[in-house]
Image (spheres, grey):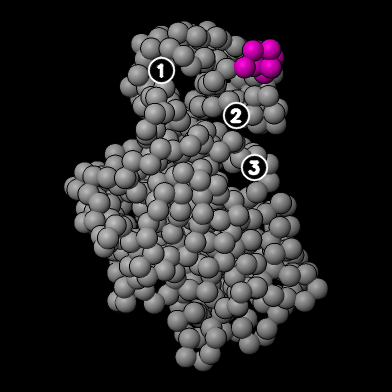
Amino acid sequence: MAKIRVLVVDDSATMRSLITAALNRDPDIEVCGAAGDPFEARGMIKALNPDVVTLDIEMPNMNGIEFLEKIMRLRPMPVVMVSTLTQAGAEMTLRALELGAIDCVAKPADALGTQDALNEIVVKVKIAARASVRTKADTAPAAARTKTFMPSGDIVAIGSSTGGVEALLAILTMFPDTCPPTVITQHMPATFTASFAARLDRASGAKVQEATDGAMLEPGKVYVAPGGATHLEVVRSAGLRCRLVQGDPVSGHRPSVDVLFNSVANAVGDKAVGVILTGMGRDGAQGLLTMRKAGAKTLGQDEQSCVVYGMPPRPLKSARWRSRFPCPPWANPSSIWPPRGDEPMPQASTISVLVVDDQLTMRALIRNALQQIGFKDIREAPDGEEALKNLLAKPANLVISDFNMPKMDGLALLRAVRSHPPIRQTAFVMLTGRADRELVQRAVQFGVNNYCVKPFTVQGLKEKIEQVFGQLT
């Protein structure tokens, strides 16, 4: 098996030496080069073609954020950011993760923390080598925020790790100010979580804050577990509250997703939704099983939209979740919580659909499946150009489109739909073959709501549509 080839970029000769030595001690890793600034690194990337880059944030001439933007625009590749444990460092690191960096490592604050930090770099470089690289280029604008949610007593618990910054931003952007009380454990250094909560708060309709011990869970609020010394739990004490608990790492992490999920199962039972997102390792698998046994709804992010497909498959292998969804869920978060209160379940007969495929036989098969589900307003187009004209003349609620078509393929159609304000909010489900993983990842970047693998069953297609619109009647 070939070794993981790494380029180390840091303006400190001491840090370059320490990181290089730590990486080279691992038999699966080889440091192919070390650069003192981005200008030197640029030439070494072209000459050495590394598998992973470790990149310092604070450097002279061109900082790590500026260089990362250039990498992700010109030559996307796995990058692990190395940052100081400061407020400014935390905010820059979050920006780097949004731009497409795979993960971040905090520089040691003193000699005692040096070995732990170096060990963490080794682990995260290995994870990065397996990750799906994402960029912000050509990302579709966010769809409109979902309709208001009528409080029902339910709560949402979310666990995530590598890639979670992007996934959580995509999801919480859609949350309204009446969302269910939501608790989140994201694997992240202690000094970063307050800045992360503030970033989510600016993006979301809900109020997002770092969880504090004893905080009451309220509708319209999201609570992010502080990194570092405690686990986040949900307990009943004159209502539902956050509790921060001292303890050893669980499933390799503190805070632990397993600890959060177990506490939600005990406190809420079937009045909860458990969601596991992108990440590496087993944290969350056992807790999600406990939630499901307690009657909670359980969901996991699918492989095509994960940066690292490590945490979601753990529950899948033991049938611990009930459904998978792509991230971001652009139409609305109905894949996470169902409509409540006086918001009616959608009726298939009231949803207009445009079917786009260059094969007449396939269009007929899709039409037949939609009619069996209960759809009545169904239109057809043989390619993307005709579909776009059709939509601009008469908008539809849902587009179901093939990838490969003449004149304008499905991906180009998706981008065109998301760039035209009158039809930007149209739900879009892409039909794909099993070997189209890279195309699916690009479609997720451009704002696809869901995808359906061919050949499909009527029930399979219905489930994909319901993950966008909610349960159909």
For the residue pair 129 and 229, the one nearer the viewer reads as 229
In reply to whether residue 390 is colored magenta, the answer given is: yes
For the residue pair 451 and 352, the one nearer the viewer reads as 352
Q: Horizontally, is 469 left or right of 191 in the view?
A: left
Q: Say whether marks 3 and 2 touch (CB < 8 Å).
A: no
Q: Which residue is under mark 1? A: 347
- Residue span colored magenta: 387-395
For the residue pair 388 and 330, the one nearer the viewer reads as 330
State the CA–CA distance, disc 1 to disc 2: 18 Å
Residue 139, numbered circle: 3
For numbered disc 3, what is the local secondary structure? Answer: loop
Residue type at the position of mark 3: Thr
The residue positioned farthest toward the bottom in the image shown: 111
Q: Which residue is drawn at 50% across and 67% down?
A: 193
State the CA–CA distance, disc 3 to disc 2: 15 Å
Residue 64 placement (x, y as % from top left) = 69, 68
Residue 358, numbered circle: none
In reply to whether residue 72 is colored magenta, the answer given is: no
Residue 129 placement (x, y as % from top left) = 51, 60
Residue type at the position of mark 1: Gln
Residue type at the position of mark 2: Gln
For numbered disc 2, what is the local secondary structure? Answer: loop
- Between circles 3 and 1, the one closer to the viewer is 1
State the CA–CA distance, disc 3 to disc 1: 31 Å
Q: Which residue is under mark 2? A: 425
Q: How crowded is mark 1: few (under 14 residues within 10 Å), some or many (20 or more)?
A: some
